Amino acid sequence: MKTQSYTTSIEVEKSPADVFDHVINDVSKWWPEEFEGKSAKLNDEFEFRSGDSHYSKNKVVELVPNKKVVWLVTQSIRKPDNFDWTGTKMIFELIPKGDNTLLTFTYDGPVLQDEYDRLVQVCDIVIKELLYNFILNGK
C-alpha cells in the first residue's frame, strides 16, 4: 500500500456559490453511501457507511466559501480485507470560468497496490456522474 493522488474535474453551468452549496450541504443526495452528520462548516464531522462492510468518519478540516473544502478521513475500515484509508484527504476546489464553474476533486491517501484503477473508477463515478448530475438536475 502506498499514498497516491488522483484528480478528476467537471465543469458545470452554475456559479461557484451554487456548486459549493451542493458540495457541502447536499452530500447525502449525491454521495453513493449512507451519510450521517454535518459537512457544511469547519470541524463538522460526518460518516459514510455501506452496510457493515465499509465505514469512514470524516472531518471538514479546510473550508473557504465558494472556493475549497477539504475532508480528512479520521477513521476508516473496509471489513472484507481490513483496508484502512485513515489520513486520506478529499479535496474539492472550485474555479470560476466565465458563467461556469470548474470543480476539481482530488483523493490523496492510501491505495492498495492493485486498486488504483478501482480508485479512478469510483472517483469518476462519484464526481463525473453522481455529483455532476445532481448539480445540473437536482437528482
Image: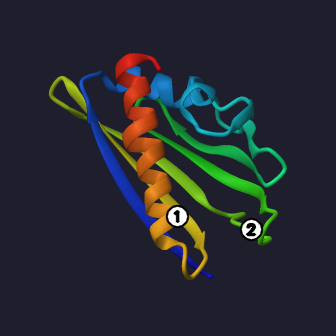
Outermost residue, left side: 98
Per the image, the residue denoted by label 2 is 84
Q: Is residue 8 above or below residue 112?
A: above
The one nearer the camera, 105 or 17, is 105
- Image spot of residue 36 (x, y percent): 76, 32
- Graded by Cα atoms within 10 Å as few (under 14), some (14 to 19) or many (20 or more), the crowding at tag 1 reads some
Q: CA distance from mark 1 to mark 2?
A: 14 Å
Q: Are marks 1 and 2 in contact (CB under 8 Å)?
A: no
The one nearer the camera, 108 or 132, is 132
Per the image, the residue denoted by label 1 is 108
Q: What residue sits 41% from the left and 29% below the top? A: 66
> Would residue 76 be found to the left or right of residue 31 on screen?
right
> Would residue 52 be found to the left or right of residue 19 on screen?
right
Q: What residue sits 50% from the left and 31% below the top? A: 23
- Image spot of residue 139 (x, y percent): 47, 20
Q: What residue sits 37% from the left and 42% below the top? A: 128
The one nearer the camera, 19 or 139, is 139
Foreground disc of the pair 1, 2: 2
- Image spot of residue 86 (x, y percent): 72, 63
- Image spot of residue 13 (x, y percent): 24, 24
For the N terminus, the image quarter is: bottom right
Q: Is residue 1 above or below residue 83?
A: below
> Would residue 24 be found to the left or right of residue 58 on screen?
left
Q: Amino acid at mark 2?
A: Asp
Residue 25, by quadrant, is top right
SS state under label 1: strand
SS state under label 2: loop
